[in-house]
Image (cartoon, grey):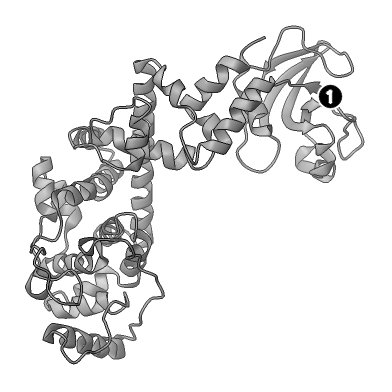
Amino acid sequence: MEKLMQFVWQHGFGIRPGMTTVDGRRLNIISQGKLNTDAGPDFFNATISIDGQTWVGNIEIHVKASDWYRHRHDIDKAYDSVILHLVQENDMEVRRGDGSVIPQAILRCTPEAARRCNTLLLDATRSLPCRETIASTPHIYITDWITALAMERLYRKSERILQLVKDTAGHWEGAAFITLARGLGFGLNSDPFEQLAKNMPLQFLNKHSDELLAIEALLFGPAGLIPAPEPSEDPYVTRLRQEFLFMSHKFQVREQQVIWKMSRTRPQNFPHRRIALLAELVHRGFYLVREICDCNSIEQLRKIFNVELQGFWATHFTFRESAPACRATALSRDSIDTLLINVAIPLLHARHMTLQNFSGMEQTVELLQNLTAENNSITRLFNTAGLKCLDAFTSQALIELRREYCEKSKCIYCRFGHRMLSAEIAKP
């Protein structure tokens, strides 16, 4: 309920002519202040007038007035600057730490508004309670929100990359290696892949790039994927194990404590061939950022990741027997496009950000708009509400909406949730 009350106050729905404090004094809201998302009062820098006297300070919101004491605000100096206490239920008078009484007013939310808010917050993680609202929303309103969400997601990915660049002492290719590794996890194994890349940094692997078996040993060994010896195993597996034992003694390399998710997963989606792809790219010379920046089209970007594996991994999905369906090409067309969306384009955008190349940043948006939309449970869910996903720019926006708003119960900060609530809240 407090989230709903904050929403009501932030957007001015609770501000009415003729408002009074609970003790009958005339109350005029000049500015409701700025929502505070951190610790402290709910709204900063508000301006109000009580019986003609102007006050500037902060505003706190509670369902019951007594929550002021339950939350121990009376002994927290951060709340001494509160000039107005907004409540649904005035069950007692409240005072600051120095004993002075805080002006109090009723902020009412209709039962229907509360019901809609509860529906959003309780059901959004499981379904799409705003489906009918989305379906009835004007197209231009939807387009504006989709654009904002897609850009929000792209910038967040870019900021993550820039933090990796900082963590690797400005080494862009090292940051790209970690980003690619995470991307090769395709969500299911993204965290283990990222941990592996951080534990085996590119600068270290580059020292052994002339020998593919050494790089594979330095990746498969720490990943904990090299199987125990078997009498009939392929000679490659034996050599790989021996190479890892040598490397582990020489460089004190150890297995990482991670859990790879492989249950109910098709063999082609196991991490083995994707680790082999990483090793192959390092062996060839890992210059991913430079290669991406040199590309002028989506087809050129695709060629970077259209890699054929050598030897053992050209015919195997795992360390077991060869598979007739296994192709030498490491990734399918759809998987490559997923890497463009989650790795190549964010890397390119982050690079243009650092160079303040605004036209280059706009080109990354155009690349997303020219890529086919992702087909997953999220895009299919929004499709049931009439949100057609025609390109990757839109699918990225819908993923951002689901992950950062629906699943985090931040519906009142979503423009669809706002629209669903505002019609009821705005009623007099």
Q: Position of residue 56 (x, y in %)?
A: 73, 24
Image quarter (top left, top right, bottom left or bottom right) of the C terminus? top right
Provide the residue designation for mark 1. 103
Q: Nearer the viewer, residue 78 or 8?
A: 8
Say which residue appears at 39% left-offset and 36% top-offset. Answer: 152
Q: Confirm whether residue 84 shows in the render.
A: no
Question: Seen in the image, is 207 located left or right of residue 87?
Answer: left
The residue under label 1 is which amino acid type?
A: Pro
Image quarter (top left, top right, bottom left or bottom right) of the N terminus? top right
Say which residue appears at 45% left-offset and 22% top-offset. Answer: 132
Say which residue appears at 19% left-offset and 37% top-offset. Answer: 372
Residues packed near mark 1 inside 10 Å, few (<14), some (14 to 19) or many (20 plus): many
Q: Confirm whether residue 125 shows in the render.
A: yes
Q: Position of residue 252 (x, y in %)?
A: 34, 86
Quadrant of residue 368 within the rendered picture = top left
Quadrant of residue 43 within the rendered picture = top right
Question: Seen in the image, is 180 located left or right of residue 259?
Answer: left
Q: Nearer the viewer, residue 287 or 263?
A: 263
Q: Position of residue 322 (x, y in %)?
A: 12, 73
Say which residue appears at 61% left-offset and 28% top-offset. Answer: 34
Number of numbered discs:
1
